[in-house]
Image (cartoon, helix red, strand yellow):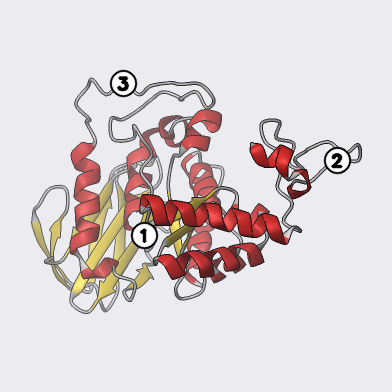
Amino acid sequence: HHWATEHPDWYIKDADGNFTDPNGWKDVIDLNYGSKEMRQALIDAMKFWVNECGIDGFRCDMAHLVPLDFWKDARTQCDKVKTLFWLAECEVIEYHEVFDVTYAWEWMHVSEKTAKQIASLQHLKDVYNKYAHYPEHARKLYFTSNHDENSWNGTEYEKYGNGAKAFAVCCCTLPGIPLLYSGQELPNYKRLSFFDKDQIDWNKSPALHNFYKQLFELRKGIKAFKKNASCFILHTNADDKIFAYLLVNDESKVLVLLNLSPEERVHFTIEHESLAGTYKSLFSELSFKLKSNEQFELMSWEYVVYHTKA
C-alpha cells in the first residue's frame, strides 16, 4: 500500500523497526492508531465508500483490535454523510457504544458443544440470557457457519451433525439477526478454501432454499420479531433437551420448540400465560389452538415454529 512508503509512521514497528502485526498474522501489517493523521486518513477512506459508492454500512473485521475511540470518531463522521449500519466481528459489550450489531461468537461455540453433547443446554440458555442483558439497542448476529468457521473448523454438518437445521432455526428465530453464509441453502457439505478461489457448485437446485426463505419471510412479516417484542424462555419438564421460547408483541406471537438432543420422542409440558392463542405451523401450515398449558412431543433434533397471524 502506498501509505507504507509515503507514511511509514502510520504503522506499528517491531524492535528492529520492521512493519509487524502483534497477532502473529503474516499477511498484514498493523496500523498505528496513535497517529491522528492516520486516523483521519482512514476515516476519509471510509467516507469515500459512502460518498462515491453509496454503501449502507460497514462490517468491521476483528473490531475489538481497533481502539473504541477510533470507531466513535469514525461513526460520528461517516453518519453525518448518511445514516449507516455498523456490524462488528466482536463480542466486547462496550463496542455497542458504536456498533448496532455484534457477532454471537460465544453462542456459536457453545451451540456446537451442545450439539456434540459436551456442553449442557442450560449453558446455551445462559449465553442467550447474557445477551438479553446487553444495552437495549444492542443486537446479536447468530450463525452456525461463516467464512472462518467453514474453512477452519468445518461445515455446519461436521459441527452439528443431524442437528444442523434445528440450530439454523434457532439462529433465525432468536431476537437478533441471522447470518446465512454462502452455500448453506444448497446445503454445502464442503469446506471452502480460505485463501484460494474455491467456487461453490450452484448447479443443483438449492434444497434448503424454501427452508430459509420461510424463516426469513416470517421474520419480516411478524411483529413478534420487532425490537420492542418480549422473548420468554419457557420452562419444560425436559429442560436438558428442549429449548422452547415464546416471542410476544401485543397479539403477535411466535412459539419455537427445539429438541436439541439425539433422544427420540421427548414428551414435555409448557405452561405460560401468554401461550394461549391460535397458531399456524410455519413448515406444515397446519393450524393449532393452544391453551396456556400444553403438552408436546418432538423427535430427535426436531424443530417446530408456530406463529399467530401475520
Task: State the CA–CA distance, disc 3 to disc 1.
Answer: 30 Å
Q: Estimate the x, y position of residue 284 in percent, counting from the top left.
A: 12, 48
Question: Closer to the N terminus: mark 3 or mark 1?
Answer: 1
Query: In the image, which is nearer the foreground, mark 2 or mark 3?
Result: 2
Task: State the CA–CA distance, disc 2 to disc 3.
Answer: 43 Å
Task: State the CA–CA distance, disc 2 to disc 1.
Answer: 44 Å
Q: Estimate the x, y position of residue 7 in percent, counting from the top left.
A: 73, 45
Query: In the image, which is nearer the foreground, mark 2 or mark 1?
Result: 2
Image height check: is 193 above or below 303?
Answer: above
Say which residue appears at 27% left-offset and 73% top-offset.
Answer: 248
Please name the residue that numbered disc 2 is placed on: 14
* Residue 242 in view (yes/no): no
Please name the residue that numbered disc 1 is placed on: 174
Q: Which mark is residue 48?
A: none
Residue 307, quarter of the rendered image: bottom left
At label 1, counting other C-alpha atoms closer than 10 Å, the crowd grade (few under 14, some 14-19, many 20 or more) is: some
- Quarter of the image for the N terminus: give it: top right
Say which residue appears at 31% left-offset and 74% top-offset.
Answer: 229
Three-letter amino acid code at the position of disc 1: Leu
Residue 198, quarter of the rendered image: top left
Of 140 and 293, which appears nearest the observer?
A: 140
Direction right: furthest residue: 15
Please name the residue that numbered disc 3 is placed on: 201
